[in-house]
């Protein structure tokens, strides 16, 4: 079983920055993509950004130009650099590994989430 552990969330003022990290507990031999999703109170979970094994990235329109997703394959870690944060970015941010294959087999995995709050 692959576990994804997120870190880096917290409270930040509007216009500030945060960097989220997501580390996989097992060595991943192959993967389709890793990504970040978020869920605000009373709303459905939505895609924030994804990055494929080939390095192709995809962003929600609401975060383009402000957020950057990157990955370190050697560390089985994905990052989300969030700049110019807005109150509407407040949400629980979840890490996802899509079709990740480890010694335990392949599957789709989610982290437990990390809270990001943007408020003055």
Image (cartoon, rainbow, N blue to C red):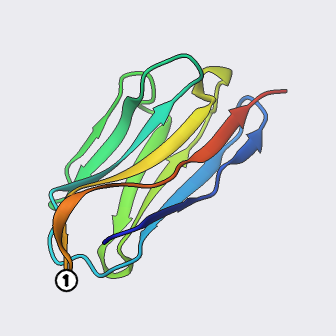
- Residue found at x 39% / y 79%: 75
- Which of the 4 image quadrants contains residue 61? top left
Q: Residues within 10 Å of mark 1 (few under 14, many from 20)?
A: few
Residue plotted at (78% across, 27% down): 119
State left or right for residue 117 relative to residue 3: right
Q: Is residue 119 left or right of residue 47?
A: right
**Taking 56 as reference, is 42 above or below it?**
above
Q: Nearer the viewer, residue 4 or 59?
A: 4
> Residue 88 appears at what percent x and percent y?
61, 20
Task: Pick out the residue farthest to the top.
Answer: 42
- Left or right of 54: which side holds 51? right
Residue drawn at x 85%, y 27% as measured from the top left: 120
What is the quadrant of residue 57 in the picture?
top left
Image quarter hosting the N terminus? bottom left
Locate residue 28, reporting x and y percent: 24, 76
Q: Residue at x 57, y 38 (%)?
A: 92
> Please, is residue 45 above or below residue 53 in the view?
above
Residue 68: x and y in percent read 43, 46
Of 7 and 41, the residue lying toward us: 41
- In the image, residue 15 lies at what x, y percent? 70, 31
Image: 42 above or below 94: above
Number of disc labels: 1
Mark 1 — residue? 103
Question: For numbered disc 1, what is the local secondary structure?
Answer: loop
Q: Is residue 101 above or below residue 60?
A: below
The image quarter in which residue 115 lies: top right
Which residue occupies the foreground of this view, 112 or 24?
112
């Amino acid at each position: 079983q692959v576990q994804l552990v997120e870190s880096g969330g917290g409270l930040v003022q509007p216009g500030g920055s945060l960097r989220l990290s997501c580390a996989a507990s097992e060595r991943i031999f192959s993967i389709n993509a890793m990504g970040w999703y978020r869920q605000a109170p009373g709303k459905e979970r939505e895609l924030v950004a994804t990055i494929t094994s080939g390095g192709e990235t995809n962003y929600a329109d609401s975060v383009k130009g402000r957020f950057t997703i990157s990955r370190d394959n050697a560390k089985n870690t994905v990052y989300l650099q969030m700049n110019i944060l807005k109150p509407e970015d407040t949400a629980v941010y979840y890490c996802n590994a899509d079709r990740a294959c480890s010694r335990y087999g392949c599957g789709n995995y989610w982290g437990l989430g990390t809270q990001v709050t943007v408020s003055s």
